[in-house]
Each structure stands twice: as C-alpha cells, then as structure tokens.
Image (cartoon, helix red, strand yellow):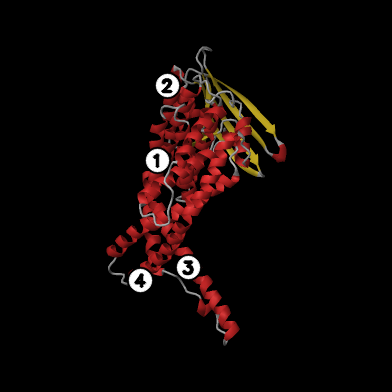
Amino acid sequence: MKARLCLHGVDVKHQAQLLGLVKKELKEYKVTYKVKEKYFPDNDMYKCRVARFMPQNDEEWLRVYCAWGVLLVSDKLINVADIIIEYEAGTLAEERVQGIVRSILESKLHFVLDEHDLARRIDLLRGRYFLDKLPDYDEKTAMTALRCHIPWHLYVINKLWEQLLLAGGGQRQLWRQLRVKLRRLRSVLALVKPLFPKAADWQRTLKAQATALSGVREYDVLLQTCARLRSAQDREAKAAWVLQQQDAEPVAQSTMLPVAAVPNLQRLLEGLRQQAQVRALQQLKLNQLTYELTQLYMAVYSWAGAPCCLSLCEFFVQRLGKWARKLQELPQLQPDVQDMEQLHRMRIRLKRFRYALQSVPELGAASQLLRSLKYLQDLLGVVHDDYVNEQYLVQLVAAYPELPELCYEVALLRGYEQAKADGALEQLSAQWQEFERLLGEWLEELE
C-alpha cells in the first residue's frame, strides 16, 4: 500500500538546506517546482513552495517532496520545512527510504515526524483531528487501527521530544506529559498486538525512552508532595488566624504562615532533580529519537496492508472485552492490602485499559467509567508513591548526615504522605466495587 512520511525540519533556515539533503540521495531524479496555497475556515491557511523529486523511470515507486513556507493557525505563523517521502510499503522502495531517512537524520539539522498533509496538520494543531475523517480510514477492516490510530501518537510524542530537548529541559509539566503520551502509545500497541507482530519489540523501545525520564520523575513526585504539604500548612495557619481574629487580639497574618514546610529537603531535592535532568538530556538526541519513531511508523505501514477478516469495531470489542474480563477476575481490593507489588501490577493493568479505551473513539466508552478508572488509578498511585518514596527518603537521610534537620523534615513529609496513603487504602474497596459495576454494564452494552 502507498505510504507517506514527513520529516519536519525544526531549525531549517532556508529551503536550499532541505534540497541539498535530498539531492545528495536522489541525484538521478529530476526536480520541478510548484507553489501551493489554500485557505480554510477560522482564517487558517498555508502557502508553500514545493520541490518535487520525480524518478526518471516511472516504474520506480518513490517520490520525494520538499515543502517550504508557512502555516497560519489561530493567528500564529508556523514554519513549513518538510521532506515528504512517498513510497510503496512492503517493497524494495522501503529499504531505500530507510537509507534516505537515516542520511537525513545524520545531518546537523533537527527533524521530527509530522503529519504530511498540511490541512490535517492544521486540524491536529487545533485539536480537531478526527480519525474517521482520515482518507485511510476503513471501518470494514481492523487494519485501520494500524494506519489511523497509531501515527498521530507518533507526531505528538516527537513534538514533545523536540520541546523538551531543544528548550533545555522545559517545564516539569512537559516531562510528565511526555511520559503519559509514551505510556498511552504503549497501551495502543498492546491493543493491536494481534495485527502487528512487532508490537512487543516497539513497546520495549518506547519503554526505554520513558525510562530515560524516570530519574527526573521520582524527584518531581517528591517535590510535588513538598508543595502540597506547604499548601496544607498554609490552609491550617490561615484557619488558625481566622479563629484568633474572632476570639482574641488581632494577630498579623504573616506570623501565622510558615516560610516553607520542609526547606532543607526541598532545596536538596531541587538540586538532585537538576542533576538528574542534566544527565537525562545529555543522553538523549532528538534525531535519534525521531529515527526510532520513524522506524515504528514504517513498520506499522508495512503490516497495515495485510488482509483481515475482522471489522474495526469487532476487533476492538474482542480485545478490550478480553481485557475487561481479566480485570473482573482480579481479587477484591481490601483496605488492609500490604502487597505493594500486586497493587502496582493492578494499577498498570488499569492504566493500560484506560489509555487504550480512550484511544478508541469507535466504542464510545461512558465518561462515568473513564472517571472511575482514573480515580481508582490515582488512589493506587498515591499508595505506590508512598511506598517508593519511603524507601528513597530513608536512603536520602543516610546519604546526608551533615544535615541533621533533614531527619525532622523527612519525618514530617512521611507523616503527611502516610496519612494520604491510609486514606486512599480505605477508599479502595468501595471504589473497586463501583468500578466493577460500571465495567459490567459496559460489557453488557458491547454484547
């Protein structure tokens, strides 16, 4: 089947840079030029100059386009600096495409995988990228899940890698968002595994990318807990101040508020997080990550043209129905559960099911079920973070004996975390029963 992939240049200054990279690989191709311009509702538009590399031999099914121009989306100008490769998936042309992609990504320019159709790229930027409107969408075959439900995840992930690596680390929220997107794509790959035999290999590749971010993640969780403790103490201090205002002599509000809940611990964690971030960014290269995602894109398309006797909805119902029934077989959660490994595995299963369900609009999962899944996942997350953080904080105190006040601050933070974890454990049983009820209703609707 015909496939198109687009490498978008992030820091390209002139179209000649793109042309030079392509001409080096396609010396025997002839080049023609054309200007494209199109207007859309909401005042969106694009205008670009396209160089078309066409083979001298029409039998060779490999064409390359270099597009240079701008998009106007939501009154913002966005550069277009694209190398678009059109080829026949599963043929000898695919091997040549891999060589071209490798050569382009070995250059000094930075590239990310992006939507090749500029009209659909505008939709993606505006958040109105509907899968069932894609030209390759065919509800009669489950293979649509490969060519429509996976590529847009790759575009979003590659863009987040660009923001993270080329902005020197970005905001903490960006690290979390990238981890979530990687986990979501891994869940989708697990869902389509019967259609895509190489899914498990690519799940491991994506997990390795996420692991590179995990060191920073542990510090972010602890720093977030420090901020919550500070907010809780602030609320208590304000409440005490209001009571004193009512019952006694006025007291300055500033005297009631703590400067910081755990200042030494927070300062230490900030420094350690910065070190972990520097180490992570030194090991990660944007073009290498783009190459891995491009290889996954091509692997998906090489299988997407295979015949399949199941329709898209039939396949999703079978797969997610099987996952749902396995969740029903899990043991009843009790408030006194102490097996943290079991709880962690349960949380991973719930998260995988939720992410996959959210990625399949065809089944129209009820928002109530999704909210229940999210709430249950968060409760288990609180319990797991408390377990992991306790081990880490003990090691941290032992590693910094020159900070005696650290023991008190860690004890304060541990008490706060333990109280939250205890509260989460108390809610698990009732929340699990509610989830089981909603899941049963959803399965009945599928049947």
Residue at disc 3, secondary structure: helix
Which tag, 4 or 2, sits closer to the chain's start? 2
Mark positioned earlier in the residue sequence (2 or 1)? 2
State how far apart marks 4 and 1 are (Cα). 37 Å
Q: Which residue is mark 2?
A: 95
Q: Report the amino acid beneath label 2.
A: Glu
Task: Return the disc, 4 or 1, that comes first in the chain's sequence.
Answer: 1
Q: Mark 4: which secondary structure? A: helix
Residue 408 - label:
4
**Mark 3 or 4, nearer chain start:** 3
Which of pointers 3 and 2 lies earlier in the amino acid sequence?
A: 2
Q: Residue at x 51, y 42 (%)?
A: 354
Q: Nearer the viewer, mark 3 or mark 2?
A: 3
- Disc 1: which residue: 207
Q: Position of residue 223 (x, y in %)?
A: 43, 60
Camera sees residue 12: no
Q: Give 73 or 221, whichever is nearer the viewer.
A: 221
Q: Return the residue found at the far bottom.
A: 249
Q: Residue 169 — which label?
A: none
Q: Do tag 3 and tag 4 residues touch (Cβ < 8 Å)?
A: no
